[in-house]
Image: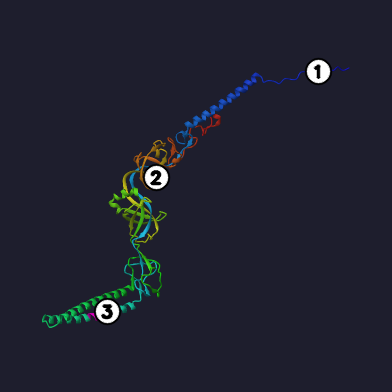
Amino acid sequence: MSVEKSPASAAPPLAPKRPSTARLTVSVLGAVGLAIALGALLTYCGKAGAKGPHAHGAFSGGRPATTVGVATAVLGEIPVDQSALGTVTPVATVQVNARVSGQLVKLGFKEGQLVKKGQLLMLIDPRPYQAALDLAQATLDHDRALLAGAEIDLKRYETLRARDSVAVQTYDDQRALVAQDQAQVRADQANVASARLNVEFTRVTAPVSGRAGLRQIDLGNQVVANESTPVTVITEVSPITVVFPVPEDVIPQIMAHHGGAGLGVTVTDRSGARILGEGRLLTLDNAVNTTTGTVNGRAEFANKDGALFPFQFVNVTLHMDLLKNQVVVPTTAVRHGPQGDYVWLLNADRTVRHQAVTVGPGTAETVSIASGLKVGDVVITAGGDRLRDGATVILPGQAPPMAGGKGTGQHRHRGSGSPPSAG
C-alpha cells in the first residue's frame, strides 16, 4: 500500500547563489588595476613623446615639423613702377587720294610695303594736263607781247606829252591799256602755275614714311579727284607712340620728374612674356578724365624692328622712380592677417615667430620692408601656412628626424621590461 506525500512535505526550491565576498573583491581589484595600468601607459607615452626628438624638431605641439623655404633679407634696389593697358598709336596716319582725275597708268607700291616720304605711289595719265599747261604758257607769251607793245607806246606818249604834242586823254588811255595788259599777264602766270601743279599732281607721292595699307583701286581704272574713299592709307610706324591711362594719384610723382618727360617706359605683349619696346614718356594730357579718374600719357618708341603694330593693345610699365638701399625680401615671404602684414622670422634654434612688418613698394618678385626687419634676418618664403609661433621647421636640404629617435627604446626587446617607443 503506497503512501502519498503531501505537498507540505515536498523539498523547497533552491535559492539563487550569491557570489562570495572573496570573489567580488578580486573582480573589483582587477578592474582598478587595469585602469591604473592604462593610465600609467598613457602617461609614459606622453613623457616619451615629450622627451624624444619630436619635442625638438619632429613635432611641435603635437604637429609634424614642416619643411619650409627660406630667404635672407638683403639690401637692394626697388623700382617704383606704374602698370597700365595701352594702345599703340601711330604718329601719323595719312589717307592717300588723287588730287586730279584721270586714268591710273602706273602703281609704285605694294600692299603692306614700307614706303619713304616722296616715293611715287601712282601715276595718273599726265598728257591732258601737260597740254593745258602748254596752252596756258602760250597765252602768257601772247599777253606779254601785247604788254611790251603797250609799254613802248606809253613811253612815246610820255615824250610827246612833255612837248605838249599829244592829247591828255590819249596819254591816259595808253596808261590804262598798259595796266590792263599787266593784269592780264599776271592772270596768265597764275594759269600757268595752276596747270603746272596739275601736271605735278598726276604723280601721287607718299606724304610720310610708313607702311602702306591695302590698295582700293587697280591699274587702268579712272581715278576721281578728292574721292571719299582713299586709294590707300599710309601709317607711320617708326617712330611710334603708345597712349595709356595713369591714375590721378600718381600724377604728382610723375610731374616731379621735369613734368614726366623722359621717364622710361617698357611695353610687353598681352601675356607679358615678350618685351616689345623700350621708350620714353613724352607728356601727360592736360586734364583728368572725370569718369575714370585717370589722365592719358603718351610714350614714344623707335620701333625699328616693327614689333609694335598700330592700334594693338599692350601692357605698359612706367618707371617712375628707383629706391635704393631698401631692405628687400621675396614677395612670397609677406603674409596678410587681421592685424596687418607679417612674416615668419626664423630663429637660431630653427623655430619661427610671428613678426609684424610695414611693407613698402615692390615688384612681382620682391618687396621692400619699411620697418620690422633688418638686413640678415631669415624669413620663411614657403610652407608658412602651417606654422604658428614657436613651431620648429625643417630647412631645405635637411633630412627630417626619425619618428622614434635614437635612445628612446625603439630597438629594445620587449622582454627587457621597458615599454615600447611612444613613436
Q: Secondary structure at mark 2?
A: helix
Up-down relation of residue 343 to residue 2 (above or below): below
Q: Amino acid at mark 3?
A: Gln
The crowd level at tag 3 (other Cα within 10 Å; few <14, some 14-19, many 20+) is some
Q: Is residue 391 magenta?
A: no
Sequence-wise, the earlier of marks 1 and 3 is 1
> Badge 2 is on which residue?
331
Where's residue 363, x and y in %?
Answer: 37, 47
Label 1 neighbourhood size at 10 Å, few (<14), some (14-19), many (20+)? few
Residue hosting label 1 = 7
Using the rendered image of the protein, determine whether residue 42 is visible from the camera's viewpoint: yes
Q: Which residues are magenta?
A: 141-145
**In this picture, residue 220 sits left or right of residue 146:** right
**Which of 179/374 is in front?**
179
Q: Residues within 10 Å of mark 2 (few under 14, many from 20)?
A: some
Give the left or right position of residue 52, taking residue 144 as reference. right
Is there any visible trace of residue 344 in the rendered image?
no
Q: Of the residues shown, which amino acid type is indicated by label 2? A: Thr
Q: CA distance from mark 1 to mark 2?
A: 102 Å
Give the SS element for disc 3.
helix
Q: What residue did someone put label 3 on?
A: 137
Residue under the point 28% across and 78% down: 136
In the rendered view, how is the structure colored? rainbow
**Whole-percent x and y of residue 243?**
36, 56
**In the picture, which quadrant includes the N terminus?**
top right
Q: Nearer the viewer, mark 1 or mark 3?
A: 3
**Of pointers 3 and 2, the one earlier in the residue sequence:** 3
Q: Is residue 328 above or below residue 407?
A: below
